[in-house]
Amino acid sequence: GGTTASMGISLYPSDARTIEDLLIAADTALFKAKELGRNRIAFFTHTMKEQMDKELYLIDGMRQALLKQEFYLQYQPQLDVNSGKMQGMEALIRWKNPKLGFVSPAEFIPLAERTGQIMAIVGWLLDASFQMMKRMMDQGISVQHIGINVSALQLRETNFADKVQQKLTYYKIDPSLIELEITESVIMNHLEETIRKLTKLRQLGIQIALDDFGTGYSSLNYLRLLPIDRVKIDRSFIDRVEDDSVVQAILNTIVTLGHSLGFRIVAEGVEEEAQLQSLTNMKVDTVQGYYYSKPLDAEKLVEFARESLNQNR
Ligand code: C2E
Ligand code: CA
Ligand code: CA
């Protein structure tokens, strides 16, 4: 506990020439100060200026992106380890801007969170994801779920569950086909509030996956409190699964504990046969990664699903 103070400093006229820009510069420095840890002072620097200019450019670009239909989704298959068949998929947002080219979601989503622009993106994201699921159902392709990434701000919105419910009704989609992916840090930052919200969503029949597990607090003790269906083990572990015996011990514990709590375990970022083998031995339920498939455009995903589900094994 305790109060801490951070400070961001910008100077006239070297950093900016108008009051507005000076404030933005100071704010950028403040943000940096906080990023570096509490109780710090940071001066606005030239590198920050470059970063700020880029961010302002991205922020401006995002304003237009929805209107100009520059966002689209790709889908990455998730496979059942036992049957080897496609089980579900994760929707991943893509942004192609004529001037900036492809911008990674790892870059623009956190920015959209800071500016609040994420709220406008979410409505689009839910529609696009639900439409994809509907399309697959109409074509007789039965996968178990589509995973949708939910960011911090959007989960904190009071009527998020209602928004999801409305769209489920509109598209006539069974709630169990929707899996919302929430990161560990989002849950831990507002534990009680998040548990309440997730419980409500689960009561609607929606599935919840704990994303990036192992990167944040990763408290095994908290795991039992969380109203979730699946645990997605972060890629950073999978990287080291073959040759690091400590990582192997940790993963074995996560799988055993997760299963005893009734959760299914997903491994993400599986790139190699040997990794798949280790994870299979550990009784991981589902795998996702380049080994099977990169994220795919809608048409390719439908093809992948058809082939995967028709194969006889
Ligand atoms: P994430 O949710 O952990 O998504 C998994 C990321 O790992 C994706 O990157 C995916 O392309 C990548 N990946 C999958 N398999 C492999 C593999 O075998 N090897 C490697 N090296 N990478 C793999 P992507 O699409 O660039 O997304 C990055 C992050 O951006 C996501 O991490 C998620 O936090 C965020 N994001 C993406 N789409 C959305 C969205 O629609 N909404 C929100 N709120 N966030 C999103
Ligand atoms: Ca995810
Ligand atoms: Ca993840």
Image (cartoon, rainbow, N blue to C red):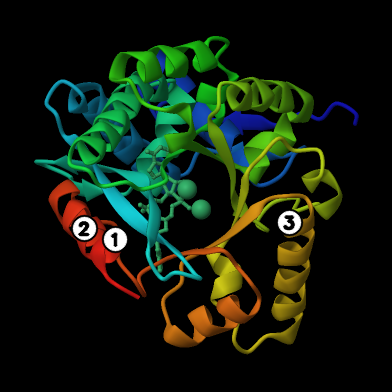
Residue 269 bears which disc, if any? Answer: none
Q: Which residue is at the front of the view, 263 or 101?
A: 263
Label 1 close to label 2 by CB (< 8 Å): yes
Mark 2 and mark 3 lie on one chain; the one further toward the N terminus is: 3
Residue 15, given in percent of the width and then of the height, sits at: 41, 33
- For disc 1, the marked residue is 309
Query: Amino acid under label 2?
Result: Arg
Residue 124, given in percent of the width and then of the height, sits at: 29, 24
Find numbered disc 1 in the image and state the secondary structure of the residue it sits on: helix
In this view, the residue farthest toward the front is 312
Marks 2 and 3 sit apart, C-alpha to C-alpha, by: 31 Å
Q: Which residue is at the front of the view, 62 or 5?
A: 62
Query: Amino acid under label 3?
Result: Gly
Query: Amino acid under label 1?
Result: Leu
Q: Which residue is at the front of the view, 129 or 115?
A: 129
Query: 170 above or below 45?
Result: above
Residue 258 bears which disc, if any? Answer: 3
